[in-house]
């Protein structure tokens, strides 16, 4: 494996880490927007208790965590291969 391949693996790892962070920030924004829109409604129970749970609100967070894990693994593998070569 050449040094160029190690750099490509590192670049992909960094890309996935940045993508994961962006997904998690997007999730925070989506949740805030959704629950702030509930404030204008008459029934405040869902706003206060967050019941029933909305699984689609957590989709971005789960995707962000998966991206972070993949990115960290790629950065570690790329770094180790770069140090070996």
Image: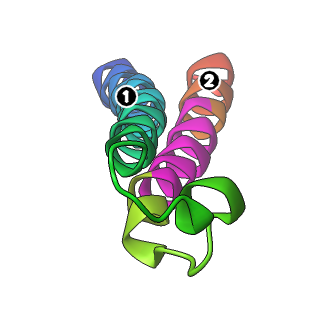
Q: Residue at x 42, y 43 (%)?
A: 39
> Residue 38: x, y in percent?
39, 51
Q: Residue at x 56, y 30 (%)?
A: 75
> Residue 37: x, y in percent?
32, 44
Q: Which residue is mark 2?
A: 79
> In the picture provided, is 64 more to the left or to the right than 33?
right
Dot 2 falls on a residue whose secondary structure is helix
Q: Is residue 1 visible?
A: no
Tell me the chief SS of the magenta region: helix
Q: Residue at x 37, y 28 (%)?
A: 22
> Residue 43: x, y in percent?
47, 65
Give the CA separation, mark 1 to mark 2. Answer: 23 Å
Dot 1: within a 10 Å radius of its alpha carbon, few (fewer than 14), some, or many (20 or more) residues? Answer: some
Q: What colouring does the structure picture have?
A: rainbow
> Where on the picture, by quarter, is residue 26?
top left
Decide whether residue 74 is among the magenta residues: yes
- What is the span of residues highlighted in magenta in the rendered image? 61-75
Dot 1 falls on a residue whose secondary structure is helix
> Where on the picture, by quarter, is residue 25?
top left
> Residue 5: x, y in percent?
32, 31
Q: Which residue is mark 1?
A: 22
Decide whether residue 3 is among the magenta residues: no
Nearer-the-camera pick, 29 or 6: 29
Mark sitting on residue 6: none
């Amino acid at each position: 494996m050449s040094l160029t391949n190690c750099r490509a693996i590192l670049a992909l790892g960094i890309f996935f880490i940045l993508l994961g962070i962006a997904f998690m920030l997007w999730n925070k924004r989506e949740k805030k927007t959704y629950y702030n829109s509930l404030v204008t409604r008459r029934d405040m129970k869902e706003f206060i208790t967050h019941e029933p749970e909305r699984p689609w609100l957590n989709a971005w967070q789960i995707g962000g965590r998966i991206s972070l894990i993949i990115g960290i693994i790629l950065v570690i593998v790329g770094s180790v291969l770069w140090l070996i070569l």
